[in-house]
Amino acid sequence: MSVRLPACRRLLGRLLLAAALIVAIGLGAKWLGQQAAVPLLLRQAAWLAPVLPAIWYFRLFGRVVRESGEMERQIYLEGAFFAFAAICVVSLGLAMAIRGGMLADVSLRKAGPLLWSAGITFWGVGTALSWRRYL
């Protein structure tokens, strides 16, 4: 007899797969983008390739939230709020440190992927903290 997991639990596995694909394709795009022998059009396409699994990731995340119970939705929402607040505080702190001359100016090309990754990480931390509080 097989045990079927709830739909949102099965979707969490796909969500992890989508996140892994974003990282793997992003690393592959970074490597391919550094190869001078590769035509420019192919390198540009490689740089845009992580967008597709990112779209898949956020669509799956929406399904996970919709198919979750009321308590899980509350936990996911609190995790998202924690991530939003943390990213606001971090980006404001970095902007003020740059304006004050404490840090070198950073381009969006360098800071963008870091902030995106930090947002996902902060959401995970916020969700874990909420799980501990409610369960």
Image (cartoon, rainbow, N blue to C red):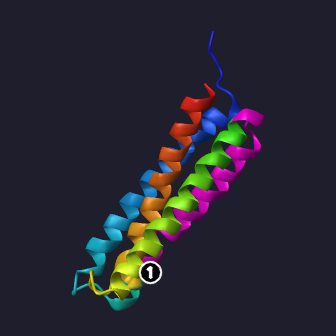
What residue type is disc 1 on? Ala
Judging by the rendered image, the residue that carries numbered circle 1 is 45
Q: Can the viewer see residue 73?
A: yes
**x and y, in percent, of residue 14 in the image:** 56, 44
- Residue 5: x and y in percent read 64, 25
Label 1 secondary element:
helix
Horizontal side of 94 relative to 3 (left or right) equals left
Identify whether 52 is placed above or below 46: above
Instruction: Choose between 114 and 90: the one closer to the eye.
Output: 90
Reply yes or no: does residue 52 show up in magenta: yes
Total residue callouts: 1
Of residues 99 and 22, the one nearer the viewer is 99
* Range of magenta residues: 45-71
Magenta-span inclusion, residue 114: no
In the image: residue 68, left or right of residue 81: right
In the rendered view, does 98 fall on the left or right side of 77?
A: left
Quarter of the picture containing the N terminus is top right
Label 1 neighbourhood size at 10 Å, few (<14), some (14-19), many (20+)? few
- Based on the displayed image, in which of its 4 quarters is residue 6 positioned? top right
Residue depicted at x 53% and y 51%:
123
In percent of width and height, residue 62 lies at: 69, 52
Residue furthest toward the bottom? 40
122 over 133 or under it: above or below: below
Q: Is residue 46 above or below residue 6?
A: below
Q: Nearer the viewer, residue 123 or 47?
A: 123
Residue 54 sits in quarter: bottom right
Residue 69 in sight here:
no
- Residue shown at 73% from the left, 37% from the top: 68
Image point (48%, 53%), residue name? 122
Q: Quadrant of residue 108?
A: bottom left
Q: Residue furthest top?
A: 1
Query: Which of the pair 13/69 is nearer the observer?
Result: 69
